[in-house]
Image: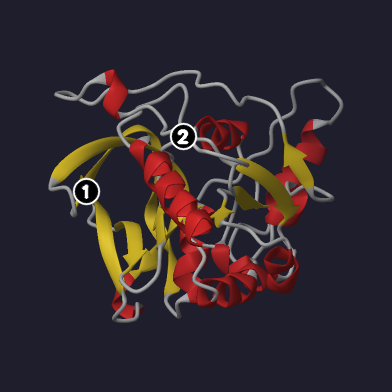
Amino acid sequence: VLHAALCTDGSRTAEELLAMARAWEGLDGRDLVQEVTCAEAYHWVDGTHVEWTPVPAGRSKESVEPAGWQGEEPLVVAYDFGIKQNILRRLTSHGLRVSVVPATTPAADVLAMQPDGIFLSNGPGDPAGVPYAAAAVRDLLDAGIPTFGICLGHQIIGLALGARTYKLKFGHHGGNQPVDDVDATNVQITSQNHNYAVDDTMLPANAVVTHRNLNDGTVEGLRLTDRPVFCVQYHPEASPGPHDADLLFARFAEQVKAHAGAG
């Protein structure tokens, strides 16, 4: 790996930049989430309109638009490990209220909010560097609340289930990564930006691999057979980017609304 440091405003000398590059500790084991998570909880109130609606081949526009909801919208609590605003837009566009909480929020605090769904966001760095997140998610999974994870959120679910994560020899970066959707027996073109993956050899029996990268066979998605929990390694919210996987948000919204209706 070639270490480098960039300066765009001339505020550092070449010697200072060289020293910074040599001192870089790498990604393994570091908690980079603390550098990007929110300082306190907040309610997301922007972007509640549908900005675009992808229409898969052979389907009508009406078949993919979010279903209506009678009464107060179900509440999703989203962990901010470095969350993207377009994820929040996609959740609200599917008729969900969203409250965002810091990465270190204990499971008990989230459960006290009485959520109808839990979302685990993307984020930077090594998932092994945020053991507090895996511990919280482990408790949340036991609650049986619909849960959806993306990218780092997917890896944290893997750790919470007792699996391990490892660093890829070649990270996945770009907007044209082919992924095999095992359940649907089709291929999705996805946007990806990650250097770590979940080792599926250590997953429990109730965890099923739903997606695999067609370039290297690594795990790109999981679901639990006994609880409404699923996650993907790639970015279905990508914009600009491929929208092949946007229906995952509709699936999550359907599970959340069913859970809210049952309550």
* x, y percent for residue 24: 69, 53
Query: 16 left or right of 259?
Result: right
* x, y percent for residue 80: 67, 50
Which residue occupies the foreground of this view, 99 or 151? Answer: 99
Provide the secondary structure element on which disc 2 rests.
loop
Query: 146 left or right of 5?
Result: left
Residue at the spot x=87%, y=26% of the render?
11
* x, y percent for residue 141: 52, 72
- Estimate how packed mark 1 is, as few (under 14), some (14 to 19) or many (20 or more) residues with alpha carbons within 10 Å: some
Residue at the spot x=45%, y=80% of the render?
162
The image quadrant that residue 33 belongs to is: bottom right
Provide the secondary structure element on which disc 1 rests.
strand
Residue 28 to residue 237: above or below = below
Residue 185 to residue 259: above or below = above
What amino acid does circle 2 point to?
Answer: Glu
Labels 1 and 2: the sequence-earlier one = 1
* x, y percent for residue 26: 62, 57
What amino acid does circle 1 point to?
Answer: Asp
The residue carrying mark 2 is 237
Which residue occupies the foreground of this view, 72 or 131? Answer: 72
Q: Quadrant of the C terminus?
A: bottom right
Residue at the spot x=70%, y=64% of the render?
110
The residue carrying mark 1 is 181
Residue 187 to residue 56: above or below = below
Residue at the spot x=32%, y=29% of the render?
64
Q: CA distance from mark 1 to mark 2?
A: 17 Å
- Estimate how packed mark 2 is, as few (under 14), some (14 to 19) or many (20 or more) residues with alpha carbons within 10 Å: many
Query: 44 left or right of 209?
Result: right
**Res 23 seen here:** no
The image quadrant that residue 45 belongs to is: top right
**Res 49 seen here:** yes
